[in-house]
DNA sequence: GGCTTTCCCTTAACATGTTAATTGTTGTGA
DNA sequence: TCACAACAATTAACATGTTAAGGGAAAGCC
């Protein structure tokens, strides 16, 4: 029995890509006027939610690969959105914190972001929305929070 | 009532990223030995499933942006995985077809790919798996197939 | 025909994803 | 203490994501 690939419109990886596309488009539109990218927005959110932390923790929290995070934090530091300080005890480790300027972006746009997500929630219905999050969490490789 | 952002671990965009990460990792591991990328695999799959087609149709089918597709097809053409011919009637249009070498990759690895997806399907259960695909389709911006 | 508009695709520029190699630091065991 | 493994972060190299601009070809209009 030669197993055949599912049609691409029922392919899980492709469905994930397309769903992400659909969800991100309005968010990207919103972020366009802030001058920051979607990933930089994630970094700010994680820092605002969990406070200052080292780069490894931040990478996990924002779901970014380390090399990406290195570039992103450099860029955000030069824009004054975050601060980076080397840990005194372990000089390999770097502590990253959100700056007032970064916090202001979060404060200014959190409302809009909530609205956008609320739109999707309404489109799916609360129950299905929560179930979707649950199912997605099952696919998450690092769900050890 | 100041609306607050949901915790990042219940954020839909982030959940989509993490789920995609989890699903793609084993697929990327498989593709590593083929020498092609995840996107090139998608292109081959769409061409194998739907036959030769112009670049615009292929871009939609493989969920790739046009500039990405231009680079990818150039690379795949030089590797002999696809063929590109300009349409005689409309010389703006480009027809793209899978080559025997490209088809061989599909044939050789389709079985493994099916196994990997079957693993996720088993982990979620058939019903939940299908429901996940349905929910994701609702978020797809271009679900006009 | 000549003009504009529209369409299909390509380039360009910059940011990120991804893997592998590298640098600087800390911990460890002989 | 000294060589060596383990660790945190960076750098490099290449592919893709994303937006904007460009270039050639077809379609419409006068």
Image: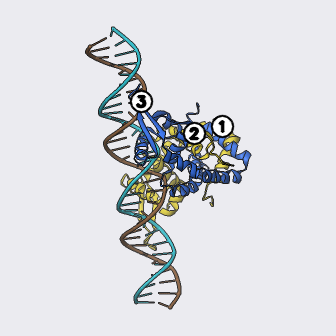
Chain colours: A yellow, B blue, C brown, D cyan
Q: Residues within 10 Å of mark 3 (few under 14, many from 20)?
A: few
Image spot of residue A104 (x, y percent): 46, 47
Considering every residue shown, the one lying at the far front of the view is B100
Q: Residues within 10 Å of mark 2 (few under 14, many from 20)?
A: few
Sequence-first tag of 2 and 3: 2
Image spot of residue D5 (x, y percent): 50, 78
Q: Marks 2 and 3: same chain?
A: yes
Residue bearing mark 3: B87
To which chain does the residue with label 1 belong? A
User: What is the spatial separation of the Cα atoms under label 2 and label 3, in whole angstroms?
Assistant: 21 Å
Residue bearing mark 1: A124
Q: Marks 1 and 3: same chain?
A: no
Residue bearing mark 2: B49
Residue A54 visible in the displayed image: no
Residue D23 located left or right of residue C29 = left
- Quadrant assignment for the C terminus of chain B: top right
Residue A17 located left or right of residue B69 = right
User: What is the spatial separation of the Cα atoms under label 1 and label 3, in whole angstroms?
Assistant: 42 Å
């Amino acid at each position: 029995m030669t197993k055949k690939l599912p049609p691409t419109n029922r392919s899980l990886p492709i469905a994930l890509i397309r769903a992400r596309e659909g969800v991100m488009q309005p968010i990207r539109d919103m972020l366009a006027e802030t001058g920051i990218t979607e990933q930089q927005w994630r970094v700010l959110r994680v820092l605002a939610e969990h406070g200052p932390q080292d780069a490894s923790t931040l990478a996990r929290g924002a779901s970014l690969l380390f090399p990406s995070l290195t570039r992103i934090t450099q860029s955000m530091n030069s824009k004054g959105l975050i601060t980076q300080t080397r840990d005194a005890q372990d000089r390999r480790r770097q502590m990253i914190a959100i700056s007032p300027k970064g916090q202001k972006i979060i404060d200014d746009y959190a409302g809009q972001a909530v609205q956008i997500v609320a739109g999707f929630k309404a489109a799916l219905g609360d129950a299905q929305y929560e179930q979707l999050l649950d199912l997605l969490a099952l696919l998450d490789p690092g769900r050890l929070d």
